[in-house]
Image (spheres, rainbow, N blue to C red):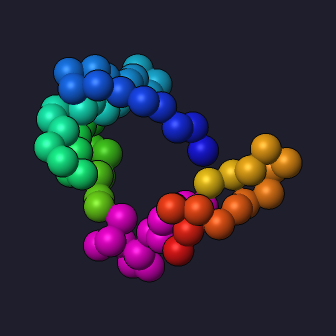
Protein backbone atom coordinates (compact mmCIF):
# COMPACT_ATOMS: atom_id res chain seq x y z
CA UNK A 1 0.00 0.00 0.00
CA UNK A 2 1.27 3.43 -0.91
CA UNK A 3 0.60 6.05 1.79
CA UNK A 4 0.91 9.73 0.89
CA UNK A 5 0.42 12.97 2.76
CA UNK A 6 -1.50 15.63 0.86
CA UNK A 7 -2.76 19.08 1.79
CA UNK A 8 -5.99 20.68 0.59
CA UNK A 9 -5.91 21.44 -3.15
CA UNK A 10 -3.16 18.85 -3.76
CA UNK A 11 -3.83 15.98 -6.17
CA UNK A 12 -2.45 12.55 -6.99
CA UNK A 13 -2.58 11.14 -10.50
CA UNK A 14 -3.05 7.41 -11.17
CA UNK A 15 -2.14 6.40 -14.71
CA UNK A 16 -3.26 8.94 -17.34
CA UNK A 17 -6.93 9.23 -16.47
CA UNK A 18 -7.54 9.15 -12.70
CA UNK A 19 -6.90 12.01 -10.27
CA UNK A 20 -7.65 12.07 -6.54
CA UNK A 21 -7.46 15.31 -4.61
CA UNK A 22 -7.96 16.64 -1.12
CA UNK A 23 -10.79 19.16 -1.28
CA UNK A 24 -10.98 20.05 2.42
CA UNK A 25 -9.98 18.90 5.90
CA UNK A 26 -12.26 19.69 8.83
CA UNK A 27 -11.40 18.07 12.15
CA UNK A 28 -11.07 14.34 11.54
CA UNK A 29 -13.02 14.43 8.27
CA UNK A 30 -11.32 14.62 4.87
CA UNK A 31 -13.24 15.50 1.68
CA UNK A 32 -11.78 13.91 -1.43
CA UNK A 33 -12.47 14.69 -5.07
CA UNK A 34 -12.17 12.10 -7.84
CA UNK A 35 -11.67 12.81 -11.55
CA UNK A 36 -12.41 9.48 -13.17
CA UNK A 37 -13.69 8.53 -16.64
CA UNK A 38 -17.42 7.75 -16.54
CA UNK A 39 -16.83 4.14 -17.62
CA UNK A 40 -14.86 3.39 -14.41
CA UNK A 41 -17.10 2.72 -11.40
CA UNK A 42 -16.15 4.37 -8.10
CA UNK A 43 -17.66 2.74 -5.00
CA UNK A 44 -17.21 3.46 -1.31
CA UNK A 45 -15.67 0.49 0.49
CA UNK A 46 -18.54 0.03 2.92
CA UNK A 47 -21.11 -0.47 0.14
CA UNK A 48 -19.12 -3.04 -1.84
CA UNK A 49 -20.17 -6.69 -1.70
CA UNK A 50 -18.29 -7.95 0.27
CA UNK A 51 -17.32 -4.76 2.12
CA UNK A 52 -13.72 -3.62 1.84
CA UNK A 53 -12.18 -3.83 5.31
CA UNK A 54 -9.64 -1.30 6.58
CA UNK A 55 -6.05 -2.25 5.77
CA UNK A 56 -3.50 -3.00 8.47
CA UNK A 57 -0.30 -0.98 8.18
CA UNK A 58 2.69 -2.96 7.01
CA UNK A 59 5.69 -3.27 9.36
CA UNK A 60 9.25 -2.76 8.16
CA UNK A 61 9.76 -6.54 8.11
CA UNK A 62 6.99 -6.86 5.51
CA UNK A 63 4.45 -8.42 7.87
CA UNK A 64 1.11 -6.84 8.65
CA UNK A 65 0.88 -5.27 12.09
CA UNK A 66 -1.82 -4.22 14.46
CA UNK A 67 -2.39 -0.49 14.29
CA UNK A 68 -5.04 2.13 13.78
CA UNK A 69 -5.99 0.57 10.41
CA UNK A 70 -6.50 -2.91 11.88
CA UNK A 71 -9.92 -4.45 11.35
Q: Nearer the viewer, residue 12 or 61?
A: 61
Is the residue 33 above or below the residue 67 in the image?
A: above
Residue 23 image offset from top left, x and y in percent: 16, 32
Considering every residue shown, the one lying at the far right of the view is 61
Q: Nearer the viewer, residue 44 or 7?
A: 7
Can you see residue 17? no
Is the residue 61 above or below the residue 37 in the image?
A: below
Left or right relative to 28: residue 54: right
**Looking at the magenta stretch, what is its main secondary structure?**
loop
| Quarter placement of the N terminus | top right
Q: Nearer the viewer, residue 70 or 41?
A: 70
Q: Is residue 64 magenta?
A: no
Is the residue 39 above or below the residue 19 in the image?
A: below
Considering every residue shown, the one lying at the far front of the view is 27
Residue at x 79% of width, y 57% of height: 63
Left or right relative to 54: residue 60: right
Q: Quadrant of residue 24?
A: top left
Can you see residue 12? yes
Which range of residues does the magenta coloring cover? Answer: 45-56
Q: Is residue 53 magenta?
A: yes
Residue 65 image offset from top left, x and y in percent: 70, 62
Residue at x 42% of width, y 30% of height: 5
Q: Quadrant of residue 64?
A: bottom right
Residue at x 53% of width, y 74% of height: 71
Residue 26 image offset from top left, x and y in percent: 14, 43
Is the residue 56 above or below the residue 36 in the image?
A: below
Amino acid sequence: MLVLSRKPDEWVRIADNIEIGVIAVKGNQVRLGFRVPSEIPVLRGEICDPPILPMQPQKKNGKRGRGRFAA
